[in-house]
Image (cartoon, rainbow, N blue to C red):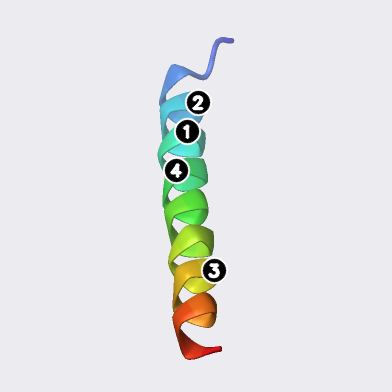
Amino acid sequence: MSNAGLGDYGTGFALIVVLFILLIIVGAACFC
């Protein structure tokens, strides 16, 4: 892994995506 910055960015982006998906699931559950 020579691109440490890219790796960190990928990890942060993945974390944001997971949190966003969880927010959608919780919101959908409450809406339904």
User: How far is the residue under mark 2 from the one under mark 4?
Assistant: 12 Å
Give the mark nearer the N terminus: 1 vs 3: 1
Q: Quadrant of residue 27?
A: bottom left
Identify the residue under disc 2: 7
- Asked whether disc 1 touches disc 3, contact meaning CB atoms under 8 Å apart, the reply is no
Residue 18 spot, x, y in % from top left: 51, 50
User: How far is the residue under mark 3 from the one under mark 4?
Assistant: 15 Å
Residue 5 spot, x, y in % from top left: 41, 26
Q: Quadrant of residue 25?
A: bottom right
Q: Nearer the viewer, residue 4 or 13?
A: 13
- Give the vertical position of 19 relative to 25 (above or below): above
Identify the residue under disc 4: 15
Identify the residue under disc 3: 25
Give the mark nearer the N terminus: 2 vs 3: 2
Identify the residue under disc 1: 11
Q: Nearer the viewer, residue 9 or 2?
A: 9
Q: Residues within 10 Å of mark 4 (few under 14, many from 20)?
A: few
Give the mark toward the camera: 4 or 1. Answer: 4
- The residue under the point 51% across, 36% down is 10
User: How far is the residue under mark 2 from the one under mark 3?
Assistant: 27 Å
Residue 7 spot, x, y in % from top left: 50, 25
- Asked whether disc 2 touches disc 4, contact meaning CB atoms under 8 Å apart, the reply is no
Give the mark toward the camera: 1 or 3. Answer: 3
Residue 28 spot, x, y in % from top left: 53, 80
User: How far is the residue under mark 4 from the one under mark 1?
Assistant: 6 Å
Label 2 residue SS = helix
Give the mark nearer the N terminus: 3 vs 4: 4
Q: Amino acid at mark 1?
A: Thr
What's the mark number on residue 23? none
